[in-house]
């Protein structure tokens, strides 16, 4: 046994302090759990990844995994919902690559990700694409009109 | 489903053998290091396979089988106990009581992890946008992995487009998905849980082995009360993995200081290299840890440190220099832009305030980890100055990393408020286990103060370091 350190404090006090920390830590962990449970109940699928995988599932059967897909949406890029919608869509369709149509040459195929019902064909026309299929849940597949 | 579990199991087995071969000693510490060594080396080898367009389910299992066999062979050849053998002694009642508290706290941590994973099985924002998204590309066929390092990833958005981010976690998850032949969300959930568990094991296990069982358990309890850490366990981000690597590097450098030898130098180098392969924050840490280790251990250690660090550093350099397209958008493009940002005094204050707020938010009111640490500091007091000075050099890599993280806020081209609010708690979560470890190594042990018997192994290691050191030097 190593020699005990010279100590002016009561061993009972030291052991009591350790136990107090132990008990408080249990309550701390309990509190974290309660916060997490409350947040999870309030915001299931908080970032939309699971929802996007359901919405984009019909697209995966129609488009090869190597495809590069143009991406457009009715959400304005300045809206907070724009980024999570794009990222969830990219996650759901990977390894297909989504290319924001504002960022470069438009690919042969494009996907529309819409937040509300509207005339999808007209939305595609405005960007030089014709509607191939309305896949439901606000997802539509388009093909570029000019080669 | 079973196939990704088999891949995970094989990578952990290889890590276990590697940890036993290089480090030995405490089995808890080896189990924790297994979650870093095995997945780390496997992710590098998987990245090599992917870059050579040679990835397939068969290739993954062949690679993992070879890695496990080589690690097992190294363990058979080199493993030997580091600390003098000593009989086990019955732990004092305080250790039992703290063990019970730790078990209860860890039950709540597990429930926390479970609730968060159930609500968001694909992880939180960055998991979906960066880590798991890149894993999906890396697990795909026919050169599509290059999309993981393409400038198009993340829609070129400043917070999501990081083609040069290191690939440890993404490649590790991708390897399991490749083995399974699909994107089972359980794979990243399991990886996340394992990494969090490894941090708890390493923090508690290394302190128990080096100082005392009671200190080890107290450190686990304080970490369990740290919401800043618990809230990240199910996020499926690389931050806790980075925290595991930082902690492992400190624990191994400390061990190598006590028991110098090629195996521990190599293990410390391996962890430093792997920390660069996890996140960009690992780069300044790896540089500082390797430099300080080279200074501390001098010439004989250099080759072994370099050998250990080579896989992680080479993989990171290859990724950043040869494969990643585009540049990190959050850094200024010119020196003058950088200088203008650094000159803004408000940014210094804002970044400091961000870190301060993250520490304030690290826990709840009376169970805040800083309060728990203050209680322990008052009750146990700090070890004598000579003992504290012996480990002072271990603060340097942590300090350098914190300074680099602070510097990133000064330089960022993103909106500073947004950048701080979305990342500062994760940066703290990376450093938190290391800060706790450093704090607990400075305290007196409850066993010594309360005149309780210390666990035999720790007592023997503490009582006889010079002899142990001499023995190892001879051999």
Image (cartoon, coloured by chain):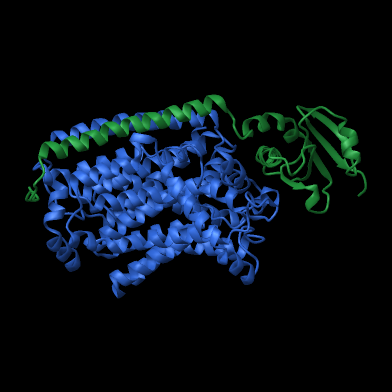
Chain colours: A green, B blue
Residue depicted at 61% across the width and 61% down the height: B331
Residue B454, image quadrant: top left
x, y (%) of residue A7? 9, 48
Q: Nearer the viewer, residue B262 or A76?
A: A76
Q: Nearer the viewer, residue B469 or B427?
A: B427
Q: In the current view of this chain or complex, which residue is farthest to the bottom? A: B299
Quick one: B468 or B16, which is closer to the camera? B468
Q: Is residue B354 left or right of residue B298?
A: right
Could you tell me if residue B259 is visible in this image? no
Residue plotted at (27% across, 44% down): B374
Query: Closer to the camera, B183 or B438?
Result: B438
Above or below, comparing residue B305 to residue B175 in the picture: below
Residue B183, image x, y percentages:
59, 37
The C terminus of chain B: image quadrant: bottom left
Asked where in the image residue B102 lies, by quadrant, the reply is top left
- Which image quadrant is residue B363 in? top left
Q: Position of residue B243 (x, y in %)?
A: 41, 50
Residue B368 in view (yes/no) = yes
Q: Residue at x 31, y 48 (%)?
A: B30
């Amino acid at each position: 046994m190593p020699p005990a350190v010279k100590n002016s404090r009561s061993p009972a006090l030291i052991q009591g302090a350790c136990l107090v920390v132990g008990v408080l830590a249990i309550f701390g962990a309990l509190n974290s759990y309660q916060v997490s449970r409350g947040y999870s109940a309030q915001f299931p699928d908080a970032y939309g990844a699971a929802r996007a995988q359901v919405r984009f599932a019909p697209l995966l059967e129609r488009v090869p995994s190597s495809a590069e897909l143009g991406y457009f949406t009715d959400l304005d890029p300045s809206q907070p919902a724009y980024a999570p919608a794009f990222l969830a869509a990219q996650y759901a369709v990977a390894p297909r690559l989504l290319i924001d149509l504002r960022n470069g040459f438009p690919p042969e195929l494009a996907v529309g990700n819409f937040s509300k019902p509207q005339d999808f064909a007209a939305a595609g026309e405005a960007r030089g694409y014709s509607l191939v299929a309305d896949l439901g849940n606000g997802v539509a597949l388009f093909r570029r009109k000019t080669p | 489903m079973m196939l990704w579990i088999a891949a995970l199991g094989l990578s952990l087995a290889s890590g276990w053998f590697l940890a036993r071969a290089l480090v030995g000693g405490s089995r808890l510490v080896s189990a924790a290091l297994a979650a870093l060594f095995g997945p780390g080396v496997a992710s590098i080898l998987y990245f090599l396979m992917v870059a050579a367009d040679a990835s397939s389910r068969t290739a993954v299992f062949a690679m993992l089988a070879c890695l496990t066999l080589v690690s097992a062979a190294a363990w058979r050849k080199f493993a030997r106990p580091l600390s003098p053998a000593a009989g086990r002694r019955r732990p004092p009642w305080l250790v039992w009581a703290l063990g019970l508290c730790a078990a209860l706290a860890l039950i709540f941590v597990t429930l926390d992890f479970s609730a968060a994973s159930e609500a968001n099985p694909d992880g939180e924002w960055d998991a979906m946008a960066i880590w798991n998204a890149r894993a999906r590309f890396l697990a795909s066929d026919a050169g599509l992995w290059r999309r993981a390092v393409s400038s198009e990833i993340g829609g070129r958005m400043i917070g999501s487009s990081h083609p040069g981010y290191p690939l440890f976690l993404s490649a590790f998850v991708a390897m399991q998905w490749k083995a399974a032949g699909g994107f089972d969300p359980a794979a990243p959930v399991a990886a996340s849980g394992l990494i969090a568990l490894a941090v708890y094991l390493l923090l508690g296990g290394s302190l128990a082995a080096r100082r005392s069982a009671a200190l080890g358990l107290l450190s686990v309890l304080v970490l369990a009360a740290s919401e800043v850490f618990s809230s990240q366990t199910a996020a499926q981000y690389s931050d806790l993995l980075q925290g595991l690597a930082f902690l492992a590097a400190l624990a191994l450098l400390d061990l190598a200081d006590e028991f110098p030898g090629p195996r521990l130098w190599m293990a410390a180098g391996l962890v430093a290299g792997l920390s660069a392969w996890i996140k960009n924050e690992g780069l300044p840490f790896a540089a500082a840890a390797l430099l300080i280790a080279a200074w501390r251990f001098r010439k004989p250690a250099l080759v072994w440190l370099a050998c250990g660090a080579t896989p992680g550093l080479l993989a990171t350099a290859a990724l950043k220099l040869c494969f990643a397209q585009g540049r990190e958008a959050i850094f200024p493009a010119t020196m003058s832009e950088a200088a203008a940002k650094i000159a803004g005094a408000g940014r210094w204050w804002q970044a400091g305030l961000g870190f301060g707020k993250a520490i304030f938010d690290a826990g709840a009111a009376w169970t805040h980890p800083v309060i728990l640490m203050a209680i322990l500091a008052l009750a146990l007091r700090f070890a004598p100055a000579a003992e504290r000075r012996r480990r002072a050099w271990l603060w340097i890599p942590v300090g350098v990393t914190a300074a680099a993280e602070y510097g990133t806020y000064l330089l960022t081209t993103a909106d500073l408020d947004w950048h701080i609010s979305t990342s500062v708690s994760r940066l703290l979560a990376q450093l938190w286990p290391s800060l706790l470890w450093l704090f607990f190594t400075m305290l007196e042990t409850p066993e010594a103060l309360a005149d309780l018997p210390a666990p035999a192994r720790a007592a023997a290691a503490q009582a006889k370091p010079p002899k142990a050191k001499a023995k190892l030097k001879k051999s």
